[in-house]
Image (tube, rainbow, N blue to C red):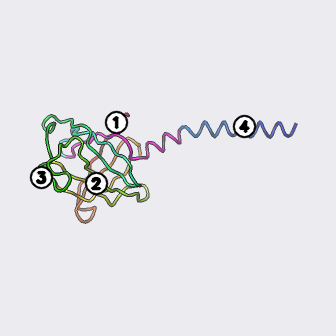
Amino acid sequence: MLRRNWMAGFLGGFVLLAGLGAPLVAQARNGSPLGLWRTIDDKTNKPRALVRITERNGMLYGTVTAVLDPIYADKHCVDCAGDRAGKPVVGLEIIRDLKPDGARWDGGTILNPEDGSVYHCRIHVGPDGETLIVRGFIGIAMMGRSQMWQRMPE
């Protein structure tokens, strides 16, 4: 009898923990910067592009997958240097080499395809899991500007 009650308690606890695990998995996904994001222009507050953030070798990279503003639809990065020079904006890797730093990712760069400028970059997912705070800066983070990107469904 004792053996049966112990087993029932164990299985009941396991079922309870399994039920609690689903929200934890969703929370972990929402806390991750991986996925598709809609960029929002910090000056006009209008959607500009879709950027997919992926992980390679423990670092994050972001690639433009679509341009939402028709003015920039067929643009190329004419002022870019190196391997990005003259490339179309769609398909351009604009975020490189972000490394984990606690709850944020830091130490990489972000490219502004409009003028070819490359800035230091720091990102973190907002508390709602649906916004990504992207900060580009020169030198120290206080000397830069931030954008809030919106998570897109996969």
Of mark 3 and mark 4, the one earlier in the sequence is 4
Marks 2/1: CA–CA distance: 19 Å
Q: Which mark is residue 152?
A: 1
What's under tag 1, amino acid-wise?
Met
For mark 2, does the 10 Å Cα neighbourhood hold few (<14), some (14 to 19), or many (20 or more) residues? many
Marks 2/3: CA–CA distance: 21 Å
Q: Residue at x 77, y 36 (%)?
A: 8
Residue marked by disc 3: 79
State which quadrant residue 97 falls in.
bottom left
For mark 1, does the 10 Å Cα neighbourhood hold few (<14), some (14 to 19), or many (20 or more) residues? some
Q: Please report the bounds of the magenta region as a residue range.
A: 23-42
Q: Residue at x 84, y 40 (%)?
A: 3
Marks 3/1: CA–CA distance: 29 Å
Regarding mark 4 in the picture, which secondary structure is present there?
helix
In this view, the mark in front (4 or 2): 4
Regarding mark 2 in the picture, which secondary structure is present there?
strand
Regarding mark 1 in the picture, which secondary structure is present there?
loop
